[in-house]
Image (cartoon, rainbow, N blue to C red):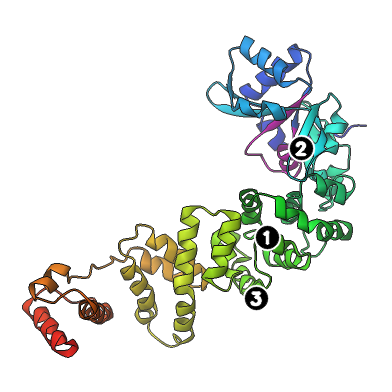
Amino acid sequence: MTEKLDSLEFKSIWNDELNYLFDLFERNDFKIRIAGGAVRDLLMGSKPHDIDLATTATPDQMKEIFDKENIRMLHTNGEKHGTITVRLNDKENYEITTLRIDVLTDGRHAEVQFTEDWRLDANRRDLTINSIFLDRDGSIIDFFGGYEDIKNHRIKFVGQPSTRIQEDYLRILRYFRFYPRICLDENSHCSQSIEAIKANATGLKGIAGERIWVEFRKIVCSKFADSLMKQIVDTQVHKYIGLPDSCNLNEFSTIYRNFEKNLIDIPSPITMVCSLLHSAKEFEKLHKRMKFSNEEKRIAEFLFAYRDQCKRNLDQENGTKLEDKLKPFKFILVDNVKDGKAFEKLTELLKYVNRLEYIEHLRDWQVPIFPITGDILENLKIPKGPIYSKILFSLKESWKNEFNLDTSEETVERLKEMMDEFI
């Protein structure tokens, strides 16, 4: 007897648009079902953000139906893989994919052939938890025990782990990404899956860095992140995604443990990645592999510029007043006053060094502007060059201690004294 889902979450997804879509396919004698991640989420008691669908209709048949109904189609370039995306009532997007089998794979991409066999389509999917379908009446179509794996908090590949991995080596990282979403224990890995991952890790060399980062950024901020990173290193996966041989697991684990009870505050993925690295040079090498965004790169550069200095300051802050503790971080904001994202970067740094309580104290602090301009130095006939730079640096360091210099005659006299000192 087929098991049925009758939850509030399942009932809540049936808006006018989804009902219309199912009616449309059924009127044209095609089967359509909810597929993939949406099914997984519903079976776990969550309402999915997106609802993907699978059908026996081919892309050409779908286009014919949608054209006849004047339904707007998006991203039709996905049709060679069997996928058509439609927008209904200018409200909801639905991605609908023809049932398919892989006829040729190279570990990165697959050449597909369309089918009407639901089991064959499920067999090409990565994990059992992602291979389940749902009928309109809530019937659970589960060929490989995915629902049992969800109920028992297990992560397993569909069929033989090595076979599934060799079809697309990115599935190694997808295993680690989904593990904390399903499993309750950080050490309940399937030994057969781990052995297959270790045996096939080298295949990740051929996977584009951008695809790797899409998966890896979710792993480093997830539940069990420190345990997963140890597994990634133990299985040698880290070597083939661009990380150094000697990842700084201790630093990564320290930062993760500071946030594991409240992961909503965990640092950004790029900050967590930086904790695995010993130097900016290692980051540059990783950046060439993973192709981080410009904003992520700037955050990393900021962290490497200040993290070691901040850790040294924190080692000496016991017993000092709050204002004194905040001062080094105020200095950083002053040094980066022209950077519109300086506070966001400082927030990542404060999370890195576990000083979240400083964030609110610094959020509304008005960053002062250094009052001595090049015009003032020029009027005093201070020539540009080493002396000019020394005077400016010395004066700014003095000003940073109190933030109280102005452009009065007293300041000018101070400048003249410094000229005598340096010249």
Q: Contact, CB < 8 Å: mark 2 with mark 3?
A: no
Q: Give the residue at x 66% y 32%.
A: 12
Badges 1 and 3: C-beta atoms under 8 Å apart? no
Nearer the observer, disc 1 or disc 2?
A: 2
Vertical placement of residue 242 versus 412, above or below: above
Local packing at callout 3 (Cα closer than 10 Å; few below 14, some 14-19, many 20+) is few
Instruction: Report the disc number at residue 250.
Output: 3
Q: Residue furthest bottom?
A: 421
- Name the secondary structure under disc 2: strand
Looking at the image, tell me whether mark 2 or mark 3 is earlier in sequence order. Answer: 2
- Give the spatial CA distance, label 2 vs label 3: 39 Å
| 289 vs 331, nearest the viewer | 289
- Residue 187 location (% of width, % of height): 80, 65
Q: Position of residue 388 (x, y in %)?
A: 20, 77
Disc 1 from disc 3: Cα separation: 17 Å
Where does the C terminus fall, quadrant-wise? bottom left
Image disc number at residue 266: none
Q: Callout 3: helix, strand or loop?
A: helix
Q: Amino acid at mark 2?
A: Ala
Q: Give the label on residue 223, or none.
A: 1
Q: In the shown orientation, is residue 158 left or right of residue 318? A: right
Residues 51 and 167: in front is: 167
Residue, disc 2 = 110
Please tell me which of labels 1 and 2 falls first in the chain: 2
Determine whether 242 is above or below 4 in the image.
below
